Image (cartoon, coloured by chain):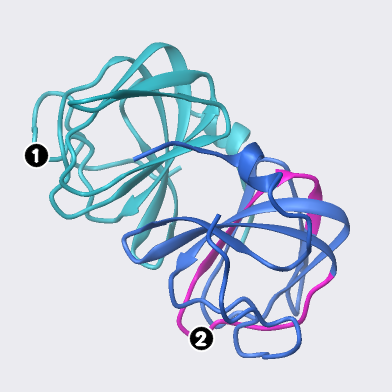
Chain colours: A blue, B cyan
């Protein structure tokens, strides 16, 4: 059992929309990701997702509104709700979601990451 | 669906060892708490617990070692592992754990909070 330093883990990668797993508990993964640019519209039929901004800011787009999230702000996206993260500049995110969660949900594409690295 | 600002939520309470619920997803609660002083030794037989330091620092004591956690550091305490948080000065914590989790685990006392406030 060791502590996890978020800054140290974030320094280990620099690519976008490729979440890394940093912990697991109760069937949930704790992940870190960096976003820049536009992700794909998608939803998760069976998983709620939590996003916490560690550095920077991004827009979480929904079909009927957009929420701008800044450092130390959280959004919980319920299962079944279409969403698309868009970041004008690099943003660092902590995510908390079930082990079963695929990054692109129901919208498989070249952005899909089937197997995530553990760091 | 609204965002959750951690600083705004933390400003809503000032007592210690009395977690508040700020979100729920996939059967897990997201909680905020402030610690100061010594908590009780306890374990959770069925729940892993995650602690993320938002401000300040504290020691997570285990029977055979102590880990000092500072801002932007996480520890995941596996089910069944005895632990005791001790904070010399006030520390603000974000916690992820199953909805079923009782703050004092198997060590019910006057510090037990059966019903947590949602903020």
Q: Secondary structure at mark 2?
A: loop
Q: Is residue A42 magenta?
A: yes
* Residue found 45% across the figure and 78% down from its top: A100
Q: Is residue A92 above or below residue B90?
A: below
Where is residue B6 shown, x and y percent of the image?
A: 59, 38
Number of dots carrying numbers: 2
* Residue found 17% across the figure and 34% down from its top: B82
Badge 1 and badge 2 both on one subunit: no
* Residue found 68% across the figure and 49% down from its top: A12
Q: Secondary structure at mark 1?
A: loop
Say which chain tag 1 marks: B
Q: Is residue A119 above or below residue B54?
A: below
Query: Residue A54 vs residue A37: left or right?
Result: left
Where is residue A3 shown, x and y percent of the image?
A: 44, 36
* Residue found 71% across the figure and 44% down from its top: A11
Farthest residue to the right: give it: A88
Q: Is residue A87 magenta?
A: no
Q: Spatial distance from mark 1 to mark 2, Cα to Cα?
A: 35 Å
Q: Quadrant of the N terminus of chain B?
A: bottom right
Query: Residue A74 vs residue B59: left or right?
Result: right
Q: Are marks 1 and 2 in contact (CB under 8 Å)?
A: no
Instruction: Tell me the magenta residue range.
Output: A38-58
Q: Which mark is residue A45?
A: 2
Q: Residues within 10 Å of mark 2 (few under 14, many from 20)?
A: some
Where is residue A73 shown, x and y percent of the image?
A: 65, 46
Residue A2's image quarter? top left
Circle 1 is placed at which residue position?
A: B106
């Amino acid at each position: 059992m060791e502590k996890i330093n978020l800054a140290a883990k974030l320094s280990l990668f620099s690519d976008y929309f490729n979440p890394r797993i940093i912990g697991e508990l109760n069937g949930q993964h704790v992940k870190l990701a960096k976003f820049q640019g536009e992700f794909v519209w998608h939803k998760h039929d069976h998983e709620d997702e939590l996003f916490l901004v560690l550095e920077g800011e991004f827009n979480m787009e929904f079909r009927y509104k957009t929420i701008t999230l800044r450092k130390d702000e959280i959004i919980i996206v319920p299962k079944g709700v279409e969403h698309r993260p868009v970041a004008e500049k690099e943003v660092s995110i902590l995510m908390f979601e079930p082990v079963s969660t695929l990054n692109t949900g129901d919208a498989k594409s070249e952005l899909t990451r089937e197997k995530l690295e553990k760091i």
